Image (cartoon, rainbow, N blue to C red):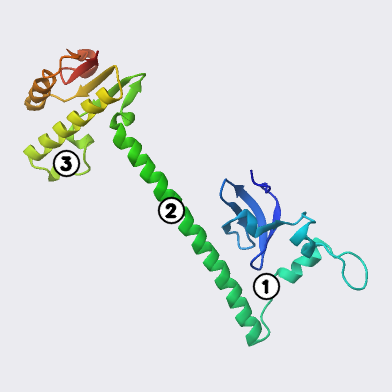
Amino acid sequence: MSKFQIGDKVKFLNAIGGGVVTKVNDDFVFVQDETGFDMPMQPTELIRMADMSGAGKMFNRQVPGGGQQSVEEAKNVFTPKKPDSVESLQDTVKQLQSQVANLKDQVAKLKRQLAAAQKQGAKELASNILSQHMVGDGEAEVDLHIDMLCENPGELAPHEAFQTQMRYFRTCLNHAFDNHLKKVTFIHGVGRGILKDEIMAELKKYDNIAVMDAPMRKYGVGAVEVYFK
């Protein structure tokens, strides 16, 4: 668990500046700087202003001439100042380049995490495509209308649309067996009855299922229920 909390004032250890913590998750601490931009940072790259150990002493220390330098006074040491020479301008540029490089690293890491999450989601969906069609405990409802299966159905020839519908039907049926579902309702529509006839012919190949017309009050004559024994 991160030692930082929302509202903490922090400084950057490897770059000039700091800000206020606006969000904390398992990987990053998001710090809003003076420009209002939320920067994702590693916890190890930050020091809380109230932390008096280690690097924290840089923000609250004894100074020559007596007294203890306050946090507010210490801010001036780490706040970029208007460059008064070519050398100071170069230093400022290097510091900004370092912050940009750090942001690029954080963005790249976030992209890798997103890609991994998407890959895992695709893998889980591939193992049980019916997970997106579940309507109850062990029950699914699959709409086989072609506009529910592809983005541009108008670009498909009739035989291509029919093949797409049958492929999806067979995939869902296989996943229902593999995942031990109790019932799947296939909505085939009315049309010319070609899709329904082909589905019924396919279902007759199985002995361990029961097939019934779906309730007319809900589906009309455009759906069939498949029960798995």
In the rendered structure, the answer to whether residue 167 lies left or right of residue 36 reads left
Q: Mark 2 points at which residue?
A: 112
| Residue ID at (64%, 66%) | 14
Q: Mark 1 points at which residue?
A: 80
- Residue 153's disc is 3
| Residue ID at (6%, 38%) | 159
In the displayed structure, would residue 91 be above or below residue 198? Answer: below
Secondary structure beneath disc 2? helix
Q: Position of residue 90 (x, y in %)?
A: 60, 81
Mark 2 to mark 3: distance in Å? 33 Å
In the displayed structure, would residue 109 be above or below residue 3? Answer: below
Q: How many residues crowd mark 1 within 10 Å: few (<14), some (14–19), many (20+)?
A: some
Number of numbered discs overlaid on the protein picture: 3
Q: Where is residue 220 in the image (x, y as percent from the top left)?
A: 18, 17
Q: Where is residue 134 in the image (x, y as percent from the top left)?
A: 33, 25
| Residue ID at (34%, 22%) | 135
Which residue is most to the bottom?
Answer: 86
Q: State which tag comes first along the sequence, 2 or 1.
A: 1
Q: Where is residue 99 in the image (x, y as percent from the top left)?
A: 57, 67
Instruction: Kindly indicate whether the residue at mark 3 contacts the one at mark 2 (C-beta within 8 angstroms).
Output: no
Which callout, 2 or 3, points to the residue nearer the camera?
2
Mark 2 to mark 1: distance in Å? 33 Å
Q: How many residues crowd mark 2 within 10 Å: few (<14), some (14–19), many (20+)?
A: few
Q: In which quadrant will I find the C terminus?
A: top left
Mark 1 to mark 3: distance in Å? 58 Å
Which callout, 1 or 3, points to the residue nearer the camera?
1
Amino acid beneath label 1 = Pro
Secondary structure beneath disc 3? helix
Q: State which tag comes first along the sequence, 2 or 3.
A: 2
